[in-house]
Structure formats: structure tokens, C-alpha cells
Image (cartoon, rainbow, N blue to C red):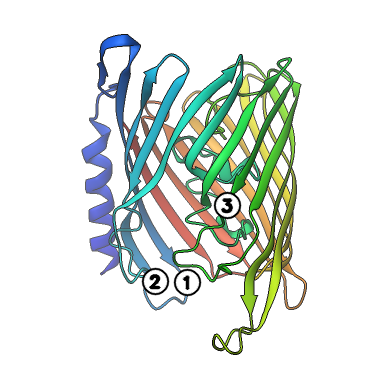
Amino acid sequence: MTRTDLLLRAALVVSTFAAAPALAGPRWDFDDGANLQFSLLGQFHAVTVADAVADRDLYLRRGRLIFSGQIADGVKVFAETDNDNAGNAAVSSVSTDLQDIFVDLRLRGDHWLEVGLILLPLSFENTSSAASLLGLDYNAEVIKLANTFVWRDQGLMLHGACGGKFAYRAGVFDGYEVGTTKNPEAAPRFTGHLEYAAVGAAPTGWFHGQERLGGDPYLLLGTGIDYQRRANRAGYVSAADPGWTIDSRAFVVDLQSGFVAGGMFGTLDAGWYDWDNLNFHGSTWFVESGLRRDRVQLTGKFAAVEPGVGDAIRNLTAGLHYYRLKHKLRYGVEFSTGDSPNQLLAGVQFLL
């Protein structure tokens, strides 16, 4: 693909959605207070990577069909599909996956029990909504979870809020097996995250919003753990020579914040992770910030991956974003440099 072709395709994508109206997803109401709402999320990315075999590419980063609603008062449901990286030259195959599906049962007040295929409640970053990210994509380079399906696992999770200042998410999971090297005899997995709202109120929604686009100032402080005993087998050769089992551990301290500065709205996200699993041993961390006036936002991020053995990787990213219809229609461009190859990423998001 030539650079001209890439620019023409990107211009076509932008012009197509620039005329999109501000619409809400359709909702159906049924008897006994039941309802169902449908949403559509699309994120198109155009990327140029220095010194890469496929150095220019345009693809669908995410294409999600989202269903949410309730069966009755105190019984909520959520499901979404994803067709991610369609057209990405670096991905060998693409499929439509049922990525989330769960039922959420109110136990009492603000305390709920969620059951199904769930985002593991380790940190603010990996439980953030893809529709309200601060940058164009997740800071996936710092998330080194083992035995998951795109950071998700099957199990049950308690979540809720206490006194308006504390929120919690804690669950027991199986350890996802398909496409992983999970030990079939692994113990149950325990994952949880505790949040304290030093400023503002503790959030109680299913997903965190990295960029709230205004509102009252807030400061959320969090800490999380993930542990599974005998999670994987290392050195496996055959049933007669199964190698040895290793545990999977992770620990995080993180924060999310929004504030007003000189008539502009600022956002700050950060997290430090310690990992010890089959995928990675060492620490990762990032600091990401944004400063927005009206519809225009500047962002910056520093991320580091520091293995216990080997060289560290540190990268710096700067971005410029425009919110035409808030999260319903957003454009952005980011440039990353550092130890990884230089990258220029452009993106268009629509949310119906």
C-alpha cells in the first residue's frame, strides 16, 4: 500500500463519520421492567511503523456489538462481541468473538454479584471501557496477565461501594484455558482491586472511564492483586515428562484523576505493576496525562517494561485529539518514540 493510498483511505474514513449525527443506541422495553439496549463501537486505526516489514497499515482496531439491560430490577445483563484487528497485516487470522457475557445480581444496596466471562478486576487500566480511553488505545504493553482471553476470565465477582469513598471488585476465576498453557490442575484464581476516592465519589459502574470529558474533579487511588497457584507448567515435554508447575502472581498500585486547571480539564492515569508468571517476570509502569480545552486535547504518556533479566523498554508518546461529539465521534493522532521503533498512529472512533 502506498502512502497516498493510506492517506486516501484514512480521509474516506474520517469524511464518512464526520457527518454522523449524535444518536443514542436503540432500546427495547419489555414487561415487568425488563429492557435491552444496543450499541455499536467502531475504532479505525492507520499506522506507520519505522523499519517494519508492513510499515503502513489501515485496519479496524475494534468493531463491537454491545448489548446491555436488565431482566428485572436488580438483575442486569451485559454482552458484547468484538471483531478486532480486521485487516491488520500483523495479525494472521481474525474472528468474531463473544468477548464479554455476564449477569449482575444485586445482593443488597450497592453490593452486586457478577457471574460470567468478566474482565479480571486487577487495575484501573485493564477494566477501562474501550469507548472512553485517554489515548487511542490501551496501555497494553504494561499488562502481562497470564491465562486470560483478552484480559478476561470465567468466574464470579463481588463488587460494590461503601460509604461513597471505597469501591471494591474481588472474584474467583478458573484461569482461562483456550489458547493458553494453563495447567489443567491449577488451583482457583483470585483477583481483586480496592479503590479509594480521595476526591469525589467512588465509581460503581461495570467499567472505568479513563477520560470523563469534564465534570467534577476526582482522584481515585487503587491497589490490586492476581494470584493462581500452580497456574502453568514449565518445561513440559509429554505426559510422562510434565515438567514443573509455577504460580502466577501480580500486584499493582494505580490512580485515576480528573481536575480543572486554568479553564482546561486535565486527566491523569498511572500504574505500577509487579509480575511473576509464565509470560513475564519483572515490573511495568506508565504515566499518562491529558489536557483539554473545549474539543481539543493534548496527551502524553511514558511507559516502561522492565524485565527481571534483559533490557528495559521505555517509550514516550504524544498525541493530539479532537472530540466532535464527545466519545460518539473522536479523531486523534499519536507519535511514539523510544526503545521501540518510532510509530505514527491515527484513529477515528464512533459510538452509536
Mark 2 Cα shell of 10 Å, populated few (<14), some (14-19), many (≥20): few
Disc 1 or 3, which lies upstream in sequence?
Answer: 1
Q: Secondary structure at mark 2?
A: loop
Real-space Cα separation, disc 3 to disc 2, in angstroms: 21 Å
- Residue 223 pos. (x, y %): 75, 41
Element under disc 3? loop
Residue 281 shows up from this direction: yes
Residue 50 numbered mark, or none: 1
Q: What residue is shown at x 25% (from left), y 62% (from top)? A: 4
Q: Which residue is mark 2?
A: 55
Mark 1 or mark 2: whose residue is earlier in sequence: 1
Residue at horizontal 50 percent and vertical 68 percent from the top: 180
Q: Which mark is residue 307?
A: none
Say what amino acid the circle numbered 2 marks. Asp
Percent x, y for residue 291? Answer: 61, 33
Q: Are marks 1 and 2 in contact (CB under 8 Å)?
A: yes
Q: Residue at x 47, y 39 (%)?
A: 321
Q: Which circle marks residue 139 in the picture?
A: 3
Mark 3 vs 2, N-terminal side: 2
Of residue 68 and residue 350, the one placed in the foreground of this image is 68
Residue at figure coordinates x 47%, y 56% from the top left: 149
Q: Are marks 3 and 2 in contact (CB under 8 Å)?
A: no
Q: Dot 3: within a 10 Å radius of its alpha carbon, few (fewer than 14), some, or many (20 or more) residues?
A: some
What's the residue type where badge 1 is placed?
Ala
Q: Amino acid at mark 3?
A: Asn
